[in-house]
Amino acid sequence: MAGIGIRLNRIFSKNTITTSLIGFGYSMVITVAPMFLVIIAIMVMQLLLGFSKVAYADRELYSCTVLYIFIFSLLTAAPFNAVLSKYMSDVIYNEEYEHIMPCYYVGLILNVGLSCLVGIPFCIWEYVVGGVELLFVFMGFCGFIALVLVFYTMLYLSICKDYKKISFFFFLGMLTAVVLSLILVYLLGFSVTYSMLFSLDVGFLVIGSLELALIRSYFRENSGKYREVLRYFKKYWQLVVTNFLYILGLYIHNFVFWSTDMHMVVAKSFVCMTTYDMATCLAMFSNISASVIFITRVEMHFHDRYKLYSEAVIGGRGMDIESTKRRMFSQLSEELMNLVRIQFIVSAVVFLICITLLPRLGFGGMVMKIYPCLTAGYFILFVMYSAIIFLYYFNDLMGAAATSLAFCLATFAGSLVATHLPTIWYGIGLVFGSAVGWCMAYHRLRVMEKNLDVHIFCNGNIMKRGHGRRPSNKVYDRAALQKAKGVVKQ
């Protein structure tokens, strides 16, 4: 994550209100701007095309299709992205850039393969049982695969630190989608829902194509070593577990409420609970600045302390290693506390604004009753994920996997209980799960702090590991030795 640290240091070093706002804006652009651009594009299309005048059944079918496209594209990408990111980082560190394209192709096949394995049966069900028109089903599936390509290719550009180009590509893609939807509806006379879904498909395809073209311009050589990538999945299986369970935990509380009698079924295929899903979206946006704050703080402060400790381990004295270790963990604690303090202020302000303004915009009733508890849950959740990132720094992959597992299971159990509670407590499952995950992550960080020397210096092997039959554990045989001596004398 060192790529944007220099730029942020230059911005914040002037210590003025203006530069602080610029630095926050720059961090926003490189982290969460793509998501906001997609949301803005969808809202603009709905406003300009008169989406509210469309028949209720068509509106719900379109909304559920887009919702499922986003949720399940993230879920199908989750098992692969963390391992591929690790492989990419190692390859770039070793300056073996010819291995990057094999990594890209293997990951793409795995990602698209799993997505098709999940998406095709659902589309068949949607067409056969749900009675949805084949063209609409096909466009939904195309949008799903296109977004999978976008999210997957973003991984490589993120590692290459091309955050601004990612945002620019999203801007071009969503601008294309908005303009195309206007042409389809007002010039060619197509229906609103078909035009919006098709335009989103084209927009995602534009983004993915631009991202792929940029990657191929960076990495022109191909070593053809595809098996090396697959070995990483076996070696770093904890990353698969961690990332998948974390993404699953983000939505598992929604899945629980989708199974209650409050859910809505669209076309006998899509299941959702609109009020809970809307409250979840608002709560996530209320705390999304935590990602910006964390990246900014880590890039500016913790990474330097981590680098100094690593350099001391390589060639420093014992007292230097101990000193840099203390300073590094002191900085880690400070960054977590700063994240909590700053994000609490931001979340409180956003919460008050939402409570005041959203009822006037039509968001009221059950949505605003569920919203406060979910806001607290996402606040803890983003702090927990920051602790997971710190565990990655110290290569505590088992600790990260245990944290994600505890978070996912606790959220699931808490949400099952929450379905029987009053409406205001519906989000308590996420609060409970995030708190359990945070406690697990904090415990692992404390264990790592106490045993870091053992983790760093006692993790190697004197003898090279290999595969085959284990040699005999007998190292000395007196009778055999005497017999050998008798043979020699004769």
Image (cartoon, rainbow, N blue to C red):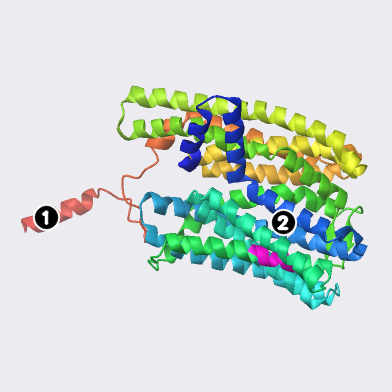
Label 2 CA crowd tier, 10 Å (few <14, some 14–19, many 20+): some
Label 1 CA crowd tier, 10 Å (few <14, some 14–19, many 20+): few
Q: Which residue is mark 2?
A: 71
Relative side of 322 to 213, left or right = left
Mark 2: which secondary structure? helix
The furthest residue to the front: 187
Label located before the other in sequence (1 or 2) = 2
Q: Nearer the viewer, residue 387 or 94?
A: 94
| Residue 188 x/y as whole percent | 79, 74
Q: Nearer the viewer, residue 180 or 121?
A: 180
For image coordinates 59% across by 57% down, the residue present is: 169
Name the amino acid type tagged 1: Gly
Q: Which residue is mark 1?
A: 486
User: Visible in this render: residue 149?
Assistant: no
Mark 1: which secondary structure? helix
User: Visible in this render: residue 267?
Assistant: yes
For image coordinates 84% across by 73% down, the residue present is: 132
Asked if 297 appears above or below 365 in the picture, the reply is above
For image coordinates 86% across by 60% down, the residue present is: 50
Indicate the quadrant where residue 74 lies. Answer: bottom right
Query: Magenta segment, which residues?
Result: 197-204
| Residue 398 x/y as whole percent | 54, 44
Q: How many badges with numbers are in the image?
A: 2
Q: Which label is found at residue 66?
A: none
In the rendered structure, are the residues bearing label 1 and label 2 in contact, judged by CB atoms less than 8 Å apart?
Answer: no
Asked if 163 appears above or below 222 in the picture, the reply is above
